[in-house]
Image: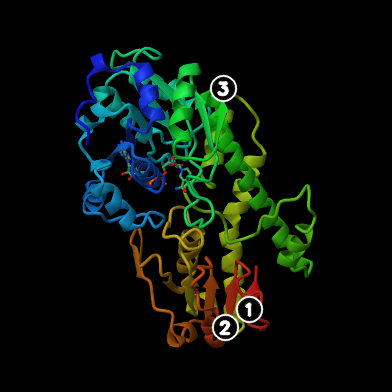
């Protein structure tokens, strides 16, 4: 790592902008999870000196030994930036003093009563406030409601006695990473950036402009915070709409998947969304709720988000009913059945279990007395409260010993022929078995 940075006398805003523009700035990324690690390695690959800071010592040890725990970042990419000296994983906050820019990528989940839990942002901001050296650009990437950067981040940073626009600048830039997406990654996904003031905008746009092909500049962090919530609320509402249409279509004897494909042949005014067992991940089930929470606080009426949430949350119940129909084919009740779940991560080809619909489905099946096992090559161990399951191998025996095979997530490596050949009954929530014309397949 370079050693000359860190002294406020030698640093000025012009100098910081210059260093960002010629990729010699020191960039710190706070929180090295699904979002932070790909970002940190992207900056390091462009020649920036990158400090990767995380409070999880296991993650820091893994990275320090060149091992990645995020599927989208191969271990050799971590090893490469480590050996070039451009990436320093650490849990020592003191190292943040060297940073010209600090990017916050910590979680924004719910509290126990489903309110926004901003404690991770607060804690990261307090850490930064204690150590940062002016001038410093601080960018928030964690998804939150409009106003978070100005109302939460700025006051914490100012609590150090430092002044906004003199000692530090702030911006919000929402993360759009789509884990498992082979086509779109950091570089070719446009990045929305909203700085608080002209200089913050210039610095943050220059920073991201060095790692992404296109920066979309907005006038304020608030606009950028809202942009992210619009994206994910749009997805949440459209998924809910198509889930409801799927339930109606089933009663009408309509193949919803074929109907959607036909509708999607219209070259304008339609965007295809597909039904499924519910929504999962750290974004779609959570982000719209953040927006609704803030809107409610401001006295606004909320309809779409609440309705969409209700419909999406009801899908696991519907799926369990289909499993009930499936085992009834062999004259059984759920309470005397064995169910093999295929895929428990929240979407295809990733290992993330957060908010996965599989969680609700497994819980309800077990509540009704079914014996549940699962197969997921990405999730070897499933732990939830007192429940602990291990992924079983997909063999003719495991498939045929189940009264129903319930496909929740359609990983692309799934051996569908094997399942189709040996299953007593299949519930297909993703249209994965569209090409199989068997009477024992129940489709969503
Ligand atoms: N996962 C996604 O697909 C995705 C996509 C877009 C946006 N986001 C948003 O990005 C943010 C981060 O999500 P994620 O999926 O990367 O979360 P994650 O849980 O994978 O990673 C967060 C990391 O932050 C660390 N951390 C927590 N508190 C910290 C602190 N005070 N200081 C330093 N490190 C700390 C954790 O140890 C963890 O490694 C969230 O706001 C999320 O909504 C996520």
Lateral position of residue 42 relative to residue 143, left or right: left
| Disc 2 to disc 1: CB gap under 8 Å | yes
Say the numbered circle drawn on residue 420: 2
| Disc 1 to disc 3: CB gap under 8 Å | no
Q: Position of residue 255 (x, y in %)?
A: 74, 68
Question: Between residues 304 and 128, which one lies in front from this camera angle?
Answer: 128
Q: Compared with residue 360, is residue 321 higher up or lower down, i.e. above or below?
A: below
Under tag 3, what secondary structure?
Answer: loop
Q: Which residue is mark 3?
A: 219
Under tag 2, what secondary structure?
Answer: helix
Question: Between residues 293 and 126, which one lies in front from this camera angle?
Answer: 126
Nearer the observer: mark 1 or 3; the answer is 3
The image quadrant where one finds the N terminus is: top left
Q: Position of residue 256 (x, y in %)?
A: 73, 64
Residue drawn 34% across and 42% down? Answer: 44
Residue 197 visible in rendering: no
Q: Which residue is mark 1?
A: 441
Residue 21 visible in rendering: yes
């Amino acid at each position: 790592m370079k050693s000359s940075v860190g002294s406020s006398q030698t640093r000025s805003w012009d100098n910081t902008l210059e260093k960002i523009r010629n990729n010699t700035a020191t960039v710190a990324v706070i929180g090295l999870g699904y979002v932070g690690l790909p970002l940190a390695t992207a900056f390091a690959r462009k020649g920036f000196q990158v400090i990767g800071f995380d409070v999880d010592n296991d993650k820091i040890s893994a990275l320090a030994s060149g091992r990645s725990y995020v599927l989208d970042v191969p271990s050799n990419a971590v090893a490469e930036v480590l050996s070039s000296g451009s990436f320093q994983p650490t849990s020592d906050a003191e190292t943040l003093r060297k940073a010209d820019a600090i990017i916050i990528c910590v979680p924004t989940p719910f509290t126990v009563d489903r309110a926004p839990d901003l404690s991770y942002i607060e804690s990261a901001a307090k850490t930064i406030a204690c150590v940062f050296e002016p001038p410093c650009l601080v960018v928030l990437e964690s998804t939150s409601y409009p106003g978070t950067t100005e109302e939460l981040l700025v006051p914490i940073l100012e609590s150090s006695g430092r002044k906004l626009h003199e000692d530090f600048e702030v911006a919000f830039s929402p993360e759009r990473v789509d884990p498992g997406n082979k086509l779109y990654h950091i570089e070719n996904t446009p990045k929305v950036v909203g700085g608080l003031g002209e200089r913050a905008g210039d610095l943050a746009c220059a920073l991201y402009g060095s790692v992404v092909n296109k920066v979309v500049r907005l006038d304020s962090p608030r606009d950028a915070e809202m942009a992210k919530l619009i994206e994910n609320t749009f997805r949440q509402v459209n998924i809910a709409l198509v889930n409801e249409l799927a339930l109606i279509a089933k009663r009408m004897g309509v193949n919803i998947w074929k109907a959607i494909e036909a509708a999607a042949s219209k070259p304008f005014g339609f965007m295809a969304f597909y039904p499924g067992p519910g929504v999962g991940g750290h974004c779609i089930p959570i982000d719209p709720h953040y927006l609704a929470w803030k809107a409610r606080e401001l006295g606004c009426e909320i309809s779409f988000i609440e309705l969409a949430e209700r419909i999406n949350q009801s899908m696991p119940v519907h799926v369990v009913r289909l499993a009930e129909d499936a085992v009834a084919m062999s004259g059984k009740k759920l309470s005397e059945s064995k169910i093999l779940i295929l895929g428990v991560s929240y979407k295809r080809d990733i290992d993330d279990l957060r908010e996965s619909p599989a969680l609700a489905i497994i819980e309800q099946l077990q509540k009704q007395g079914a014996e549940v096992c699962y197969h997921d090559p990405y999730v070897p161990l499933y732990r939830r409260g007192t429940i602990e399951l291990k992924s079983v191998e997909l063999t003719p025996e495991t498939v045929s010993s189940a009264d129903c095979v319930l496909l929740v997530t359609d990983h692309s490596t799934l051996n569908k022929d094997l399942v189709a050949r040996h299953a007593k009954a299949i519930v297909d929530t993703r249209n994965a078995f569209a090409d199989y014309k068997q009477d024992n397949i129940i489709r969503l």
